[in-house]
Amino acid sequence: METEGVQVIMVTLALQGHMNPMLKLAKVLVSKGVDVTLATNDVARKHMLDSKISTKFTSNSPGRLNLEFFPDGLSHDFDRDKDTGTFIASLKANGPRNLSNIIADLKAKGIEFSCLITSPFIPWVPGVAAEHGIPCCVLWIQSSTVFSIYYHFIKRPGLFSNLENPNGNVELPGIPMIKVEDLPTFMLPFSPAHFRLWVAEFVSVLDKIQWVLGNSVHELEEEIVNSLASVKPIYPIGPLVSPFLLGKEETVEGSVDMWSAADSCIEWLNKQPTSSVIYISFGSIIVTSEQQIQSIATALKNINRPFLWVVKASEARKDEFPDGFFEETKEKGLVVSWCPQEKVLMNQAVACFVTHCGWNSALETVVAGVPVVAYPEWTDQPTNAKLLVDVFKIGVRMRNCEDETLSVEEVERCIMEVIDGPRAEEMKKRALELKEAAKKALEDAGSSNQNIDKFISEIAGKPVGNNV
Ligand SMILES: O=c1ccn([C@@H]2O[C@H](COP(=O)(O)OP(=O)(O)O[C@H]3O[C@H](CO)[C@@H](O)[C@H](O)[C@H]3O)[C@@H](O)[C@H]2O)c(=O)[nH]1
């Protein structure tokens, strides 16, 4: 494929769940000879430069990676996760001008971008692309199912007539009957208004977008992807995971973690028996409550099997665990603040994954062939849990009691059902089937690889086929 001189600019927020898939797409493009500029908000500058990601990317690859950072108008230590409303407002006020200046400066140096790829929920970015005459693409970083739900929610609100009743049903093209409680929380009446506004703005800017690439696999969400074809086509190019999960060699090295991972856990996992370890992690945003910590810890002690548990800032939260927990379980398990999750999931010792169902975690577990206990909390996670449990059929759903607490019995029941229950073998078998489908999609003739090649040909002005 002719990619010489093709320049792409990617724009994302410095959030782990957004940065990971963008960087992975950047790697794919760079490995195919495209030059990528990745622009993100300034808060990530030190971290990304320290990680030397750009040097690692370019050391031995056909294309190059250049990093740019734009100020979002807030001080470095402002807690953007805590006060999302202020962050978004400040970003909206300052981001467009600052991003535009970067593009103008690069243009002055002779760089002409063939395409701007944005992550979702930064609705002003397509406007900046248009200002510079650059065709715009969005990388949808969640499931195609969630994309379709949001799209229909804004374009055909009549399909969602009663969102007050969590047990009410919603019927959508390509989606088997789905309950209100399985919909993304951003669209539900109890969710803060700025989240609904995000969704509305996201869908409204789709009219200005030429391509929607999805971090998913056609074969995993076939009906949904097909049903969107005549409405707003989405082209699955995933799973955007590290190549070693797919049994491939890294042609472009380098990744960036917002926290440093405890590599010691891999050494520890290597010493555990095959399919014995319960792995628990709730991603980069959710803060596990003390009540949840107490129930999960007690359940792990009762189950008495090896475990690896990620609790962010676990050192500082030691007194929130049951008395004597660390002493009593020191032979059995590890609690760490952050781990190299993809390597963990690929380790032969892991038996199941207790997950919050963030979409990256969902894809990683599918590719690793590890069954799940699905414990979603907010945003797209309830829908991902529905996919993992009822559509992919690789896990069980863990639920809170009526008073919203998590009981010890529920944690034990769900973990035991996945590792030892009557359907455990079936779930494992299904997980391995999906793993194969996901791997195939990125092989030369696979659906995702073909979609990527067509996308590159389109932006390079050399169209092949008509998928993208
Ligand atoms: O100890 C850990 C825990 C996580 N991860 C990685 O961090 C990422 C976490 O991403 P994800 O599973 O998607 O969870 P969140 O960080 O919570 O992601 C946010 O963004 C996602 C993409 O939009 C959404 O699907 C989620 O609901 C939302 O919470 C994954 O790649 C994990 O491999 C690690 O490397 N080490």
Image (cartoon, grey):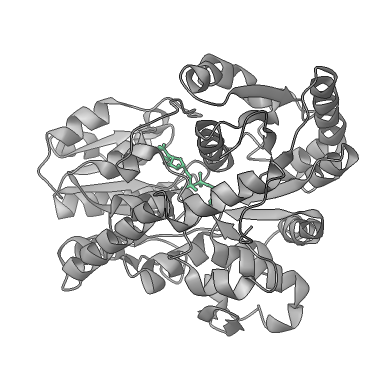
Quick one: 204 or 338, which is closer to the camera? Answer: 204
Residue at 68% x, 50% y is 138
Instruction: Give the side of residue 272 with respect to residue 229, left or right.
Output: left
What residue is drawn where x is 77% and y is 24%?
111
Q: Say whether residue 413 is visible.
A: no
* Above/below status of 71 relative to 409: above
Q: Is residue 167 above or below residue 425?
A: below
| Whether residue 160 can be seen here | yes
Give the residue displayed 83% in from the left and 20% down from the top. Answer: 105
Q: Position of residue 396 (x, y in %)?
A: 32, 67
As drawn, is 53 to the left or to the right of 302? right
Locate residue 400: give its quadrant: bottom left
Q: Position of residue 126 (x, y in %)?
A: 80, 46
| Image quarter of the N terminus | top right
Image quadrant where residue 395 sits: bottom left
Q: Quadrant of the C terminus?
A: bottom right
For the point 53% across and 15% down, the residue is 50
Percent x, y of residue 360 = 47, 48
**Location of residue 341 in the rendering, given as x and y in whole percent from the top left corner:** 36, 39
